[in-house]
Image (cartoon, coloured by chain):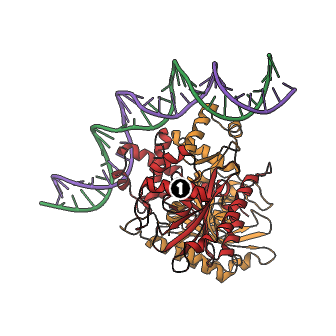
Chain colours: A orange, B red, C green, D purple
Amino acid sequence: MAAAGDGTVGKALEVLDQVAAFGRPVRFSELLDQSVFPKATLYRFVQTLTNQGMLAYDPDRATYAPGVRLVRLAHAAWAQSSLAPIARPHIDRLSREVGETVHLAQLDHAQVLYVDKRNAAQPVEMFSQAGKIGPAYCTGVGKAMLAFLDAAVLDKVITQQSFHCFTPKTLTTEAALRTELADIRANGYGFDREEHEPGIICVAVPILTERGRVIGAISVTSVTRRTNLAGLEKLVPLLRDAATLIARDAQNWRFPDTADQSTGVK
Amino acid sequence: MAAAGDGTVGKALEVLDQVAAFGRPVRFSELLDQSVFPKATLYRFVQTLTNQGMLAYDPDRATYAPGVRLVRLAHAAWAQSSLAPIARPHIDRLSREVGETVHLAQLDHAQVLYVDKRNAAQPVEMFSQAGKIGPAYCTGVGKAMLAFLDAAVLDKVITQQSFHCFTPKTLTTEAALRTELADIRANGYGFDREEHEPGIICVAVPILTERGRVIGAISVTSVTRRTNLAGLEKLVPLLRDAATLIARDAQNWRFPDTADQSTGVK
DNA sequence: AACATGGTTTCATATAGTGGAACTAAAGTT
DNA sequence: AACTTTAGTTCCACTATATGAAACCATGTT
């Protein structure tokens, strides 16, 4: 679990996560039911978060939902610390070249966070995709990233995997996963062999800094009726190129040294 | 000011905002310089926020930036407590009808937060637009929302306006703004008369619940070389219709009562 | 009128945050 | 190489702050 040991702040953020996890506005009592905190404590957290704008209270329905302040903060996060803006041109090109859906993901805690997605055919549907999360142990991008983590970090992250069985092909043991990761590390790329959803396969490569730190992963997704693993494997060079370019750009990315910061909406 | 009196959590979030405000990765010392907190305290906050994923630490450059966890949370915030998903079809239609840029905004603290934008010509560029903030006292959407706030709330919000002068036409006094707001309240719509940027004008209407609570605003933006205020005024009925429909949908919006919450990335 | 149910406030207690100061690491200067 | 400065991290005694049981206040229910 995300270190709940970070004192009061950590606990408050836990509550925030809890609200977000509901996926819909929740009543205080619903939160209370599944909360580890006693009534009064939870109440205070919710109050604090609300008048901080991290939660939004709907007085008509008496419900709480993640607040709009998060949207503002996320804009900054997405623009600065996600790879999305840097990777955008490369993702675009890759998606055009391969004619399939391309995902860009990063690790958030022990989960995969999709920060961008390009669908060959359809136009972009951003926020509805960016920000979504998925399991690390049974997705292409997830495994590609895990494979290149430091041993110590990996150990911690692995303990946090649910190993829930989504399909008959899902890897459900630590041992199986570790074997797979070794493979991926050796090859430099990995597959999702219908481990998360039946009929859905993908190839993924990690995005590594020069120092070898994983900063993300990209993948090309397809369906079994259209192609197979061998078909996807042919795309590896393209993926690798894109990943390399993204890593390079990320490395060189320097932020404007000075300049006036205006409020910024054109 | 956003009640900084919310104990430890409030303080930590203040730090988070501070980092986000930089608009680029920052070093610890830079934060310290402009922080109200003593070194050790600030240090602990930054630590906590970092291992909570709210901040991301770049070891190569020794800098902090808003973390990816925010992106995940924002996804939930955007999907649930912003009007964007509900408003989307109406914004789309409006933008097609008027052939101009349409903005959807909500209030965040005392600022305007743009949660969606539809550009008649170009395709959507989501995260790069949603999440941006702007001043309330000199934008169409801002004034439209302020005009319909409760007196008490408005008083507080007005004290938080900077009244920075962006153009010769910017309203720079509380009195001027209050007069303007009275007008807007009477008419049900308001203009931005190049108050924020020269050459940029817009009409805006508030989005009101049946009970009369402001929940957001929409605007149509144009440039002076293409049209004028009278031209924009003709669009008011269309805007009003859209706003009404959005309000209705927001009112009726009920979230799935039960159903299994899967991890959810297709 | 009695009784839930959902939400808010109080208050004594101790846990958890605070911040001055001391320390270490690394970079710059003489 | 010794010496200073700057940036980042850890210590720890002190007390401000968070805690949560319990009481309380609304509403709606039987």
Q: Which residue is drawn at 55% across and 43% down?
A: A51
Is residue C24 found left or right of A230 in the rendered image? left
Quickly name the residue at label 1.
B181
Q: Which of A218 and C11 is in front in this view?
A: C11
Q: Position of residue B55 (x, y in %)?
A: 49, 54
Front position in the image: B196 or B27 = B196
Residue type at tag 1? Leu
Nearer the observer, D24 or B173? B173
Q: Which residue lies furthest to the bottom in this view?
A: A97
Left or right, A77 with reference to B78: left
Is residue A265 found left or right of A156 in the rendered image?
left
- Name the residue at 51% across, 58% down: B180
Judged from the image, the secondary structure of the residue bearing numbered disc 1 is helix
The relative height of residue A11 versus residue B113 in the rendered view (above or below) is above
The answer to whether residue B79 is above or below residue B258 is: below
Measured from the top left, where is residue B118 in percent x and y? 63, 71
